[in-house]
Image: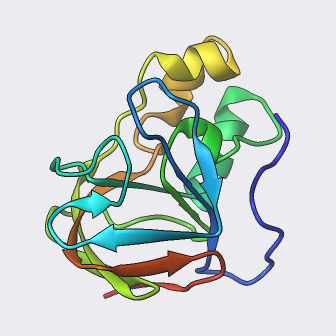
Amino acid sequence: MASNTASNTASNVVLALGSAPTYGAAIVEHDALTLLTDIGIEGDRHAGKRRAVSIVCTGELARAAAEFGCERFDGLSTRRNIVVDLDELPRVHGTEFSIGDARLAVWRDCAPCSLMDEIFGEGAQDALRQRAGITASVVQGGAVRLGDVIVVE
């Protein structure tokens, strides 16, 4: 699948941003997202829910792609909101981290749904298990832009 992520070679940075206004709607790419405290991404389908923001990283996607037998999984095609160039994401509930002006806390692992098999082919859902990112709540709102750094503490 063709890449729709920014061509940024620095590590620990945001490569792609996306949201969808309703469940099942196409992911819309953005240069910036507004994260609202205790709500999530302004205008996104998950705003106001515990899994307000979904984040996936290139390292985990690369390992899933190797297992699946493809060159790469495109981050936004996994229907996650934020794609970061990082080897792995924190998975411990409550772990705080920042991206751009926003501060977030890990809610839980974001399990891949059966839609992954429809998008990438049979077996993709299994390959993406424990590698399809995390969901997080917004502790402090702010802007997140392409190229912003993710800082995990």
The colour scheme used here is rainbow
Query: Which quadrant does the C terminus fall into?
Result: bottom left
In the rendered image, residue 20, in percent from the top left (x then y), is placed at 47, 41
In the rendered image, residue 55, in percent from the top left (x then y), is placed at 44, 57
Residue sitting at 58 percent across and 80 percent down?
12
Relative to residue 80, is residue 71 drawn left or right? right
Numbered disc total: 0
Along the viewing direction, whichever of 145 and 60 lies nearer the viewer: 145
Where residue 30 sits, quadrant-wise, is: bottom right
Along the viewing direction, whichever of 10 and 39 lies nearer the viewer: 39
In the rendered image, residue 118, in percent from the top left (x then y), is placed at 60, 13
In the rendered image, residue 125, in percent from the top left (x then y), is placed at 50, 23
Residue sitting at 52 percent across and 39 percent down?
79
Query: Which quadrant does the N terminus fall into?
Result: top right
Along the viewing direction, whichever of 29 and 1 lies nearer the viewer: 29
Residue sitting at 57 percent across and 71 percent down?
86
Where residue 151 sits, quadrant-wise, is: bottom left
Relative to residue 116, is residue 96 drawn left or right? left
Position above or below: 90 against 142: above
Position above or below: 104 against 54: below
